Image (cartoon, rainbow, N blue to C red):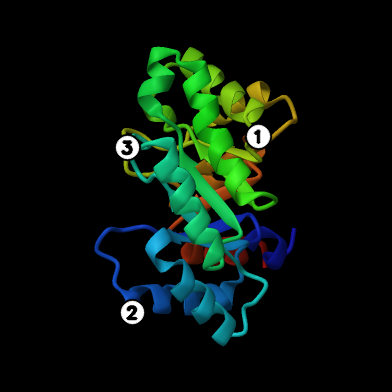
Amino acid sequence: MDRETFAKYFDHTLLKPEATPDDIRAFCKEAAEIEPYSVCVNSRFVGLARKTLDEAGAKDVKVCSVVGFPLGAMSKEAKAFEAQQAVSEGAEEIDMVIMIGSVKAGCEKMIKADIAGVKETIGDKTLKVILETGLLTDEEVVFAAKCAVQAGADFIKTSTGFGHGGATVHHIELMKEAAAGKAKIKASGGIRDLSTAMQMIEAGADRIGASATVSIINEYVAKNG
């Protein structure tokens, strides 16, 4: 695939708690040059990210906002409100964190209500549900994935990047099987080089979340011309 097609696998990500408005502006200007699928930012910065991308001539680069990040332990009403606010300011995709403790406890009804509440709020915008696979057993990964798909997730996603462990080929394969073609897969967490990104894509990831997007794309170009 060419560089442009490869770049569209990526949600170029800046979620550091210490990120300043100037950091977000510089990050979005960088994104305008590499043209990933989206930039992924904390909800506070959605409006600034959209404005900076538009000013840089990158209207085709979407803005993705995390919601309930990074713990997933707030109320479903709080998540829905945060998602609504992010969409109103220009977010076209929402990456929400699942209720991890509810997954561990097997609370299917609560998990589905949490996810469905956000999906109902954002309508036709894309919803990705972060499972935080590093905290789950294989059985819990499959359970969480199936709950998310049944509740309306468009994607299921491995990790926040702030929890224990990141994306693994094994978890991508588990999630792919559990989704059964009803949702796409996003690999995120610890993807810092081309080799790791390609392993995730080959295992079935449809999207990659990474803060090292620029260096990964440059490595791809150097290798493939």
Above or below: residue 62 compared with residue 157: below
Which-is-in-front pick, marks 1 and 3?
Answer: 1
Q: Which residue is mark 2?
A: 22
Dot 2 crowding, Cα within 10 Å, few <14, some 14–19, many 20+: few
Compared across the picture, whether 168 is left or right of 135 comes to right
Q: CA distance from mark 1 to mark 3?
A: 24 Å
Residue 20 lies, with reference to residue 44, above or below; the image says: below
Work out which quarter of the rendered image holds the C terminus and state it: bottom right
Q: Are marks 1 and 3 in contact (CB under 8 Å)?
A: no
Question: Label 3 crowding class (10 Å Cα cut-off): few <14, some 14-19, many 20+?
Answer: some
Distance between mark 1 and mark 2 Cα atoms: 35 Å
Dot label at residue 152: 1
- 162 to the left or right of 125: left
- Provide the residue designation for mark 3: 163
- From the top left corner, tell me how far across and down residue 196 is, in percent: 51, 44
Mark 1 is on which residue type? Gly
Q: Amino acid at mark 3?
A: Gly
Mark closest to the chain's N terminus, 1 or 3: 1
Badge 1 element: loop
- The answer to the question of whether label 1 and label 2 lie on touching residues, with beta carbons closer than 8 A, is no
First in sequence: mark 3 or mark 2?
2
Q: Residue at x 34, y 38 (%)?
A: 74
Instruction: Judge by depth and name the residue closer to the eye, 189 or 1.
Output: 189
Residue at 62 percent across and 69 percent down: it is 61
Label 1 crowd (10 A; few <14 / some 14-19 / many >=20): many
Q: Residue at x 62, y 78 (%)?
A: 58
Q: Which mark is residue 101?
A: none
User: Quick one: quadrant of the N terminus?
Assistant: bottom right
Is residue 126 shown to the viewer in this render? yes
Disc 2 marks a residue whose amino acid type is: Asp
Q: Residue at left 59%, top 54%? A: 93
Q: Nearer the viewer, mark 1 or mark 2?
A: 1
